[in-house]
Image (cartoon, rainbow, N blue to C red):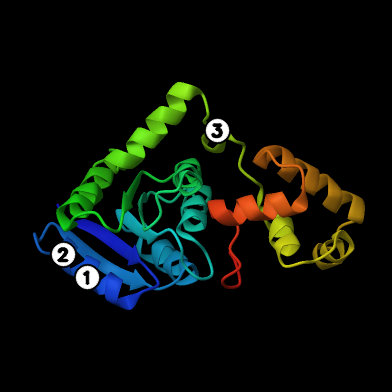
Amino acid sequence: MTIRVILADDHAVVRKGICDFLQEDGDIEVIAQAGDGAKVKELLASLRPDVALLDVRMPHATGIEVTRWIREKALPIRVLILSAYDDDPFVFAAMQAGANGYVLKNAEADEITAAVRKVAQGRSAIAPDIAEKVAAHQSSGQMGDLTAEPLTEREREILHSAAAGLTNKAIGAKLIISDRTVQGHLASIYSKLGVNTRTEAVTKALHMGIIDLSGTGS
């Protein structure tokens, strides 16, 4: 049976290269491509592929944000993150969001193709060096980023506004809630992210892909 894939990456040349080698063996079909997070959401909702192959960093919504959106919508789509980053926060944020696999862009073509097949079959596909990091964190008990309670949609809205430089009063006016309610949400955000200040929360959220300031956000 053919595996239907939607591919999202903000670099057209990269998309073409990945698309070409994925389809070489004939059992994988790239049914659509997107260059940003907003477009890929539209395609995923309408086409319902077997696998979404997502770049971790894209305009308008990161691959991690798109993964979280897929899970919130309960779409029956397997997710494979394709990234140039093997930093712990990216990996753990992707796993927490519900990704089924995480491979690096510098992997061999057959490794990426094999990863697509694995996630399509309901299996996990994590690059060996990344799997070692996850295992090391599991053995040391340092899995906070994986097990942390995810932010609510309203908390992400508030954090995105905070990242844009809005004061609590301005955020309250924008969202039609009180300053006290904004402060309460920020306290919850600090607790979930394990930070103590607004700056720390914004920095960590940007690094983990929870919020994105490269476009309009999700």
Tags 1 and 2 touching, CB below 8 Å? yes
Q: Specify the label residue 147 is tagged with.
A: 3
Give the Cα distance between marks 2 and 3. 35 Å
Q: Which residue is mark 1?
A: 17
Q: Is residue 119 left or right of residue 24?
A: right
Q: SS at mark 3? A: helix
Mark 1 or mark 3: which comes first in sequence?
1
Q: Quadrant of the C terminus?
A: bottom right
Mark 2 or mark 3: which comes first in sequence?
2
Q: Which residue is mark 2?
A: 21
Tags 2 and 3 touching, CB below 8 Å? no
- Determine whether 41 is above or below 203 in the image: below
Label tally: 3
The answer to which quarter of the image holds residue 203 is bottom right
Please say whether residue 144 is visible from this viewpoint.
yes
Q: Picture coordinates of residue 81 (x, y %)?
A: 37, 53
Q: Picture coordinates of residue 214 (x, y %)?
A: 56, 71
Q: SS at mark 2? A: helix
